[in-house]
Amino acid sequence: MEFDLSAILLFLHVIGATVLLGTGAGIAFFMVVANGTRSPALIAHVASTVVLADFLFTGTAVVLQPITGISLALRIGWPLGEGWIFYSLLLYGVAGVFWLPVVRIQMHLRDLALAAVEANTSLPPRYQKLYRIWFACGFPAFAAVLAIIWLMLAKPELGRLF
């Protein structure tokens, strides 16, 4: 059996993209549903799970994606200045700019919900403000990931930028 590093890199890269998209969509869905209940206990539980999933799954994929993608491109001979690769990397940065605050906000949402549970009170106004920011940041991050996946699959001719 021959060892095909390119195939392994491609497999890992596709799995990573799937994890980013799937975990992102799942986290968003569960947070939105939990928020809709206005139940501090439920929100605290879901947000705790979401924070763990984001670190465990999304965080791992975030670190491995550029490693596998750049390694694969160089191995195949695609220059990193190729348009679709360059724009994929640029969009990856955009997704990161929105994802990093989202992770921090999720931790704050969890902590505010836990504090409400411990004090036997409703969620404070700060919770809703942070939730709206979290919700708004999700759209550009998710759109960037979708665009990256489209660029990876379509590899449109966008010229060589450098």
Image (spheres, rainbow, N blue to C red):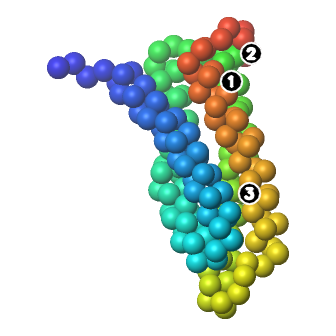
Q: Which residue is mark 2?
A: 161
Taking 69 as reference, is 161 above or below it? above
User: Where residue 86 is drawn, which disc sits there?
Assistant: 1
Q: Secondary structure at mark 2?
A: loop
User: Where residue 134 is drawn, which disc sits there?
Assistant: 3
Tag 2 and tag 1, C-beta contact below 8 Å: yes
User: Where residue 73 is drawn, which disc sits there?
Assistant: none
Measured as percent of width and height from the top left, residue 97 is found at 73, 47
Q: Is residue 104 visible?
A: no
What residue sits 67% from the left and 91% below the top?
Answer: 119
What residue sits 72% from the left and 11% below the top?
Answer: 158
Query: Mark 3 or mark 2, which has the lower sequence index?
Result: 3
Q: Secondary structure at mark 3?
A: helix
Tag 3 and tag 2, C-beta contact below 8 Å: no
Question: Where is residue 114, by image quadrant?
Answer: bottom right
Measured as percent of width and height from the top left, residue 17 is found at 52, 35
Q: As shown in the figure, which amino acid type bears the numbered disc 1?
A: Phe
Look at the image and tell me in which quarter the C terminus lies: top right
Taking 118 as reference, is 143 above or below it? above
Q: Is residue 158 visible?
A: yes
